[in-house]
Image: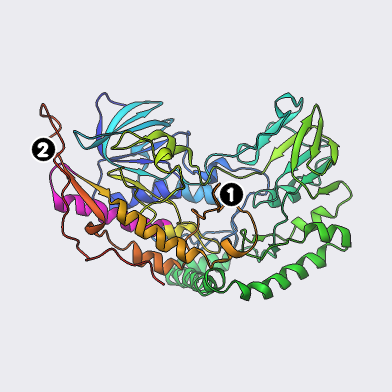
Amino acid sequence: MAEHEHVRVAVIGSGFGGLGAAVRLRREGITDFVVLERADSVGGTWRDNSYPGCACDVPSHLYSFSFAPNSEWPRTFSGQKHIRAYLEHVTDLFGLRPQIRFGAEVKLLTWDRENLRWHIETTRGSLTADVVVSATGPLSDPKTPDIPGLDSFPGKVFHSARWDHDYDLRGKRVAMVGTGASAIQIVPAIQSKVGRLTLFQRTPPWVMPRADRAIGPAERRLHRALPLTTRLRRGLLWGIRELQVQAFTKRPDELGLVEQLAKRNMARAVKDPALRAKLTPGYRIGCKRILLSNTYYPALTRPNVDVVASGLSEVRGSTVVAADGTEAEVDAIIFGTGFHVTDMPIAERVVGAEGITLAEAWKDGMQALRGATASGFPNFMMVIGPNTGLGNSSMILMIECQLNYMADYLRQLDVLGGRTALDARPGAVAAWNHKVQERMKRTVWNTGGCTSWYLDENGRNTTVWPGTTTEFRRATRQVDLGEYEVVRAARTPEGSGTAAAPRTRKPARGGQPDEVAA
């Protein structure tokens, strides 16, 4: 990077969130920005997760940007390579590559109170920015449990998000740890290759059939010739999921019928009563994300597969030991144990106006105003921030909502003029999160009787949005200045002795802070 480089906006990450932010900046007429990417290519989660069987559990036409529809999806549920190819296509379609800095991992972000800008240290050098948009995503840093004896294991160990494609699994004795969304795709993909597969299941998932099929040439030609049909298809997929939200957020008891369908799905594939008992969850469906697969249950019935209804607790040489005492000799251990979601590593690298990190500010749990901004961290925005996740629909919908908010945030800075920053008021952040958590109390994620990655170490759900995407779009339509303190610089950063002026409150454009829609 050029010495003393300064940009108006620095975006961190080049997955869906980061690329979407870059496109939106361009459409807003902002070209003075960079995208900082730690890897050597775009794609985020869909670059890093390349394990066998990797695919999306959201329909293809809903798992894409509304401003970049794709008529060429080959299947109704796309695989990893097709989603990654789509993101490469978006990058080229909107000419984003010149502004992406590959191999530029952000090591430290520090707020300069005098000059009202962020100092950014990366592995490729340093720069400053007026505004930082963090789009690192919650599924970017793998989480591997601290298992006694793991360091001395003589075989191969890797996480599903860091798959070792050079390691040949054929004929090997493999331990698969975890039964989340990645694991249920990996198990059927490797079962026929390995010598023996031992699945360590701490908690069984609810699994529904996957209504996947190939999208034929005629169907794709129709979408190419009549783009309206693509939009209609996307709209239908969206509408169905909007109607389903009530059962997750307000009436979890209505999910009982879905549980019966899931049990029938299991019974069709698993005839052994003992195995069915192991695989039957003891919590309400929807409490953890409902998984989709037509091949997971059949794979578990194969002679070379053992299901251990207990988590991995210890490794003794080549022997893996479950919490219930079950032992198995293995050559490789694969962890499908998720990511740092409620303790995002980027938070440890962001130092705000009061000299503390975002992680320290969040010591009692993550919280952000409208999922985007945190008090004490001026001009720092998040895409896929706290309580913006979904339990039954496409995250791309939520990302686009947050991009709307980002765009209006930048417009408000322009309107205010001069060297200006916006800092979320503590009261506004607290009020927003209180309403979110109040709504969360009756959702299936909080009442369903499970422990999931949606919950932090205090049992607080800081991950999921307890409403429809329509409600969230309404809540992020525009920035309410009444929810922010406006910070002005006394002089331009080039002047000497620059100091920040006292924080002054500007009249709210929309009156009182918006209520979280009931």
Q: Which mark is residue 490?
A: 2
Helix, strand or loop at mark 2: loop
Residue bearing mark 1:
80
Q: Which region shows up in magenta?
A: 399-420
Residues 221 and 122: in front is: 122
Residue occupying the point 40% across, 46% down: 18
Residue occupying the point 21% across, 37% down: 116
Judge depth for marks 1 and 2 and give the one in front.
2
How far is the residue under mark 1 from the one under mark 2?
Answer: 50 Å
Res 198 visible? yes
In the image, what residue type sits under mark 1?
Gln
In the image, residue 285 sits, relative to residue 104, either above or below, namely below
Quarter containing the N terminus? top left
In the image, residue 438 sits, relative to residue 15, either above or below, namely below
Residue occupying the point 48% across, 53% down: 462
Image spot of residue 228 (x, y percent): 42, 71
In the image, residue 50 sits, relative to residue 124, either above or below, namely below
| Residue 263 lies in quadrant | bottom right
> Circle 1: is it few (<14), some (14-19), or many (20+) Cα within 10 Å?
many
- Whether the magenta-drawn stretch holds residue 400 is answered as yes
